[in-house]
Amino acid sequence: MYNDVYETSTVRLPEGVASFIHITRNEFFRRKRKKLKEDDIAICECKYDASDPESACGERCLNSLTNIECTPGYCKCGETCRNQIFQKCEYAKTKLFRTEGCGWGLLAGENIKAGQFIIEYCGEVILSEEAKKRSHIYEAHDLKDTYIISLNSNYFIDATRKGNLARFINHSCRPNCETRKWTVLGESRVGIFAEQDISVGMELTINYYFEWYGGATVRCLCGAANCSKFLGAKSKGFQEYNHVWNDANGRYNACIKALIHFQ
């Protein structure tokens, strides 16, 4: 259950999408996956009642209320437990598409309800020092599509070389999705959840809470009425920098010398 065998799957990508290794859960760089001790396992008080489907670890589940997934073999609801959405990859249907000016994006492939789990943000879990090192390497190689996000104060998730379709979700200053951090088998993980009802065919967006540390400025093209015009425009580093915008294409598609901080 807790071994370090990483799961990959084959995903058919549209022509023109840069290749990457598709994974179904996070990989850990230079450390092993945590092994849960029995004393650390959070066990809810739910008991399955056939006449009340919500009783099987629904919204009233103590674990679910604290963003902790139930551990298989310990939950009293057994196979009926509904609080293992990350472990079971219970994703909504989504579809890649080419946007106008913002590269690739992700569409809702079905009607999605507010609060619904859409997809996990998967990648390589790396220390903050490694994240900074990689950002410099990516910049040196002129790699403009990078996907490094914060997991907590010490770790980041890098989906640049290994990840899943969540890496294609674009930023919006008025997003229809949000990120939530969950604890799954002792590890912190990031999920994308619907902030409102989303109709099939609508683009999925989140707020990157982009922190700018210098280098190329990134123009925001979300089109929202409250658009800040640049990613990270509200961050201290950006506001203190007297920047000059001179990109002929009107936009950098990079997250170079910057890290995305999900809240």
Image (spheres, helix red, strand yellow):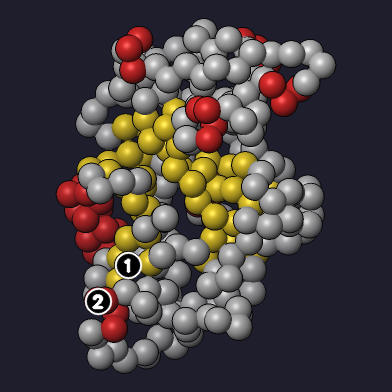
Which residue is tagged 2? Answer: 237
Q: Cα distance, mark 1 to mark 2? A: 8 Å
| Front residue of 83 and 20 | 83
Q: Quadrant of residue 55?
A: top right
- Numbered disc 1: secondary structure: strand
| Front residue of 71 and 172 | 71
Q: Residue 253 carries which label?
A: none
The amino acid type of the residue labelled 2 equals Gly
Q: Earlier in the sequence, mark 1 or mark 2?
A: 1
Percent x, y for residue 61? 58, 27
Relative to 237, say whether 141 is above or below.
above
| Front residue of 18 and 252 | 252
| Front residue of 3 and 144 | 3
Extreme-right residue of the structure: 51
Percent x, y for residue 260? 37, 60
Relative to 186, say whether 59 is above or below.
below
Q: Quadrant of the C terminus?
A: bottom left
Number of marks drawn: 2
Q: In this view, does 7 lie to the left or right of 47?
A: left
Q: In this view, does 55 lie to the left or right of 247?
A: right
Q: Quadrant of residue 262?
A: bottom left
The amino acid type of the residue labelled 1 equals Glu
Residue drawn at point x = 74 percent, y = 49 percent:
112
Are discs 1 and 2 less than 8 Å apart at CB? yes
Residue drawn at point x = 34 percent, y = 51 percent:
150
Percent x, y for residue 162? 42, 41
Which residue is tagged 1? Answer: 211
